[in-house]
Image (tube, grey):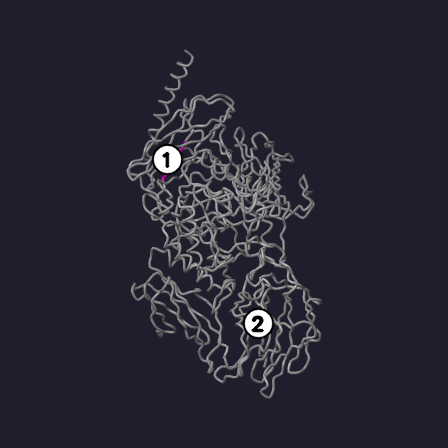
Amino acid sequence: MKNLKLLAAFLTCMCAISYAHQSVATQAASPKSIRNIVPLSREWKFIKDPANQSVLPKSNLAWQAVNLPHTWNDKDVEDHIPGYYRGAGWYKKLLKASASWKGKQVYLCFDGANQETEVFLNGKKVGEHAGGYTRFLIPLTGMLNFKGAAENLIAVKVNNRYNENIAPLSADFTFFGGIYRNVSLLVLNPVHFNDDNYGAGGLYVATPAVSAAKASIKVTGQFINNSGRSRMLALRNFIRNPQGKVVSVNTFPLGNAVNGKRISFSHNLPEVTKPVLWSPESPALYTIISNIVDAKTGAILDEVQQRTGFRWFKFDANQGFFLNGRPYKLMGASRHQDFKGMGNAVPPELQVKDVKLLKATGANFLRVAHYPQDQAVLDACDALGILASVEIPVVSEITESAAFTNNAIRMQLEMIFQNYNHPSIVIWAYMNEILLKTKFKDDEKRREVYLENVRRLALALDKVTRRVDPYRYTMMSNHNSISQYKKAGLTSIPMVLGWNLYPGWYGGKVTDIGPILDKLHKEMPNKPFMVTEYGADADPRIHADQPERFDKSVEYAVKYHQIYLNAILDRPFVAGAQAWNFADFSSEDREETMSHINNKGLMTHDRRPKNTYFLYSAYLSPKAYLKIGAGNGETRSGKGAIDGKLAKQHVDVFGNVKKAELFVNGRSIGMKTLKDRTAGWEVPFNNGQNSIKVVSVDRPGIEDQAEVHFKIIPENLKSKAMSFKDIAISVGDPRYYIDDIKGKIWLPDQPYRKGSWGFIGGEMYQMEDHLRQPFGTDKTILNTLSNPIYQTQRIGLKAYRLDVPDGKYEITMHFAELVGSEMTTMLPYNLLARYKKPAAENRIFNIYLDKVRIETELDLPKRFGAARAVSKKTVAIVRNDRGIRLEFEAIAGRPVLNALEVTRLE
């Protein structure tokens, strides 16, 4: 009898709700401020805490005023000193509690803090979180001080130290510390969706069955009743189409919600007929508005809005990827979240701009790597039509502990629940190159145990992912060691495999990529796969006439990507490929031409496009495209002809047109047919400003223009047609180097020719392990921002001559001892297994200028140490047509010269 009375009461309440929502069925209106989100990102104080104190440091210390997002590593990762601060830092802020928050549920929301976080309120610890890349909530209900003018002290301790139980343990990127995403206060009614469910929003929208005719919607979630009494509740849902019109309203009973309980629900909404499908070409978004309603009064107690898109997709091992029944090649890039000068504390608007820049190339896929990123990134993918994968940072290695496993599984669940409602996501991933640093290499039995533990963790992550979200695919990305991953039992676990392939960079030849792809398909014919990483360093300051592997030139990177793109696009069984990386990113352990930066990006660290970005636009853009390489405002330099009036230099054009014509200073220099989306001309530049224009022959109206300032160095330094002013030479280097800070261009080295300049004797410096690169070193050089000119040298040279006209000159010789210094950290790529520490070498020599000794017993290792930039200046008076002759006399070892500048003073 009691149950019948409850049922009757509930049906009466539902009728009330039905009547109440009729008036809003067409507008989905709801009262304002049901959810009060209070931004808390301004007016914080910060201090480092190397002592890792357990309590808030004293207030008389030098606290720094900061706003969020904030990282304490924005500067120390960009200097040339190895290492960066990995330790504790404290943040504090005073908060005046509003009287309107009384009786509410209050949460402190962190969108991201790296990587161990402890939160204190008024001196008492109220919560903690492990992991640096997902959102988390700290409940403050019942702990805030509302008395009078009293303020609450929020203190947050963040630590980015190494912790063997928290991924990532090691990786080719920087582990920035700090509260690097926004913080807010979430104030809710006592009855509300459970936002504290893995830091997510409490409501999850799935589209289990979609076709062009109809689409199903399933909403699941959790809510909490903390009102102090049991409540009869209902869930009301509105579906709003892409035009903003409400097309469906429905209400489901939630029953009698017991006080203090978290209650789960799952409901199928009415099918949407003839849905507008979501796709890269037309990213149509529907909105689901869900209310928790008091069944007695019809009052709305909580409301959340989620966007969704109707699409269906599948991977096929032979034919690739299909979306809405159509084949798509998933082409795009991976992305790290940091930005030059900001570290990882990047505002959402710049993150959205990245997605727009990727979309502008014609790309349709973003691999969010190697960790979940700001919600703004995936919001932009939803809105712009970029498909995506997201992964947790289990990279290179694991710790065999229950704590590591539990943290990894929790990270996976946080990632899935927090990003569940993004229609752009088609893949959840969980490991990257996990066997790259396989432990116990000298103990086979112990190594087998380790590999089994890796396999078990992969199984656990894959299982929980499929259980929580049966509608998407799972993936792990592996480095190019097929037999190793197969033997470890890892290739059979995920639904899709990702392969990070670098032939032509970290070993092998660039033309190996096609056969490698064929081998992958042959050995695992039933497993869909993508190429989830590939790339070559492209320092935007370095250019080469004859590009070669590991020269770090933009030109080699273009050649590399052309070959990869052709191989990938020609093979339907390759579901897609993501260039590594969308933009250059911070990697503190790297010693490169640009210290602590991975230069494989299609864009620079501050998001200036490289020629590789233009190449991808030419391959992927659905629109007619034509672009002059290197862009507007470019400065170049090179040798002029004997008369010094013109200098020829190669210019590349990128496009998807068939044929183009190039004009230089208003004059046509010919038509070219584009091959592999590029064409090149040997352009005759005037000294000074030059105008370049390219026009499509077959697509009228498609064109591009660029202005190039060219500085000609006459081949004959005594040319009467052009007086000599200055020259900068990167000795022992076949490349051009553009110093973008000083605006100076360093020319490639050359052997001496009468009337010109160049070296006499010696050889180009090469590392003992020269397979890493053909010349020079990749070690960071201290005391300079221009690594490239110090990383190469002529060793054992006899002299350097410049046949300059008579006059007064300043001569600057640049040196760095390249032998005897060890790399600070070895990245675990295959080729570095061969690495040997170079033996120190005695090096003492004299230098003469026109037979006059200007340096006596110069001992670089002893006086300055290894890998440190040293400059020596002198002044020369040239008379009687003798030019400048620098001579090097060995006393011990072989003399060296890294770079040379000569500037005319009079």
Q: Is residue 338 magenta?
A: no
Circle 1 Cα neighbour tier, 10 Å, few/some/many (<14 / 14–19 / ≥20): some
How far across and how far down the image is residue 871, in percent? Answer: 64, 70
Split into 4 quadrants, where in the image is the C terminus?
bottom right
Q: Nearer the viewer, residue 793 or 108?
A: 793
Residue 623 drawn at (x, y percent): 33, 57
**Rendered image: mark on residue 731:** 2
Q: Is residue 706 above or below residue 164?
A: below
Q: Residue at x 54, y 83 (%)?
A: 754
Of label 1 and label 2, which has the lower sequence position?
1
Q: Residue furthest front?
A: 444
Along the line of sight, which residue is nearer the eye, 151 or 417? 417
What crowding class fits label 2: few (fewer than 14 Cα within 10 Å), some (14-19), or many (20 or more)? many
Which region is colored magenta? 286-290
Does residue 478 lie above or below 512 as drawn? above
Instruction: Tell me the quarter of the image containing the N terminus.
Output: top left
- On the question of residue 707 being in view, the answer is yes
Q: Amino acid at mark 2?
A: Val
Residue type of the residue flagged with mark 1: Pro
Q: Is residue 485 left or right of residue 442?
A: left
Q: Along the horizontal axis of the image, is 248 left or right of 353?
A: left
Pointer 1: what residue? 208
